[in-house]
Each structure stands twice: as structure tokens, then as C-alpha cells.
Image (cartoon, grey):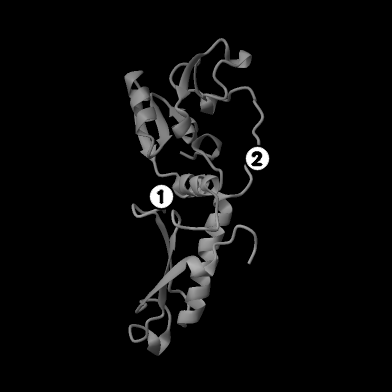
Amino acid sequence: MAAHDVPEAEIRFRTSRSGGPGGQNVNKVETRVEAVWDLDGSAAFTDAQKARIRSELRTRVGADGTIRVVSQRHRSQSRNREAAIERLRALVAHALRPRRKRKATRPTQAARAGTPDRLVVTEAFAGRAEFAGYDQVVVNPAEAYAANCVRVNEQVLVAAGYAAFEEKLRELGYKTMALEMSEFQKMDGGLSCLSLRF
């Protein structure tokens, strides 16, 4: 087991009949496997690591503090069990990956919301000398990912799930369109650094 792997002893498994591949076994043998891991109750991770995992995987953590992964692509229960464990461990490892330090750069047009003299910034960039001439819309630290937004005409494209930031933009007179970005977020992708095609 690698460092920061979820111990198999902490994972509960549920089986059911699979609708996936399996030939004559389909709907006859319980080959579908659901792996359930209690993040809050884990003894393998520190409180800080648990908080990081919860933040990074917030769309996957249930109300009961568990993370669930399902595998039904294999014909045998044992292979689906292995695949579910592997997927769960990969999710946790990705959540705990070291973050790259970002260097301050001049703002791009994609980072500007509203007028050419208005910027959306995180608290880390608010007040910097480079941005002194701009009207700054400061994003709450809890919604820092929302700073990755793009203005298209009079509308601002924003990541879904950041209600306070959307409300702040609407108070400034902008229309917003919330887009599901959770899969891109897992890869450190944001609206302001993805290509747009019209």
C-alpha cells in the first residue's frame, strides 16, 4: 500500500446484480461492487488531510461523510472490487496532490468581468500594486475557484456552486450563467484557462 492510500480495512463493500458486461452472468450473479469509505471516521489520515479531501471531493462526499465508488465493468465480482478500490484510492491521491504555486501575472482579458477596469480577484491578489488601477471584485476565500470566470458580452460565465459570488456579480448588474465545472476542477482546470469555441 502506497503512502496516503485508503486502507482496505476501512472500506465497506456492497454487491448487487450488474447490468454491464458479463455474458450469462448478467442479472444472475452479484458482480456489481460499490465501495463505501467513511472519510470522517478514517484513522489513516490527519484532520488537515481529511479537510483537504472533503474540499477537493466535495461533490462526491455524501451527507453522512462517506465517499462511494461503483464498478460494474468487469465480469467478476473480485475484479470489480479491485477496480473500485483502485478508483477510490486514485480520487483520494489526486485530492492530496501537492498544489503548484502560482506566480502573479498581469491580468488577461478573460479574467476581467464587466468593464475593462474591473477585475475579479482572490484575496491573495487583492491590493497588489500591479492591480492598483482596477476596480476589484474580491472573491471570498471559500469560493476562490469562482475567480475563474469569463465575461462574454454582458454575461459572465461562472462555475456552478458558488452562490455568494454569483450574487455579488448580479448586484453589480451582470447576468450570470453557471456552468458545471467539477470534472475540470479535479484537473486544476478553470473557465479562464479553457478554450471557448463559438
Q: Residue furthest bottom?
A: 24
Instruction: Please state if 101 lies on the left or on the right of 150 as rendered.
Output: right
Contact, mark 2 vs mark 1 (Cβ under 8 Å): no
Comparing 63 with 166, the one in front is 63
Label 2 environment density (alpha carbons within 10 Å; few <14, some 14–19, many ≥20): few
In the rendered view, tell whether residue 98 sits above or below residue 84.
Answer: above
Instruction: Please state if 187 lies on the left or on the right of 160 as rendered.
Output: right
2 or 1: tag closer to the N-terminus? 1
| Residue named by callout 2 | 100
Q: Residue furthest top?
A: 133
Quarter of the image for residue 106 reads: top right
Residue drawn where x is 65% and y is 63% of the image: 2
- Calculate the distance from the C-alpha at mark 2 to the C-alpha at mark 1: 22 Å
The kind of secondary structure element at disc 1 is loop
In the rendered view, tell whether residue 14 sits above or below residue 167.
Answer: below
Comparing 175 with 30, the one in front is 30
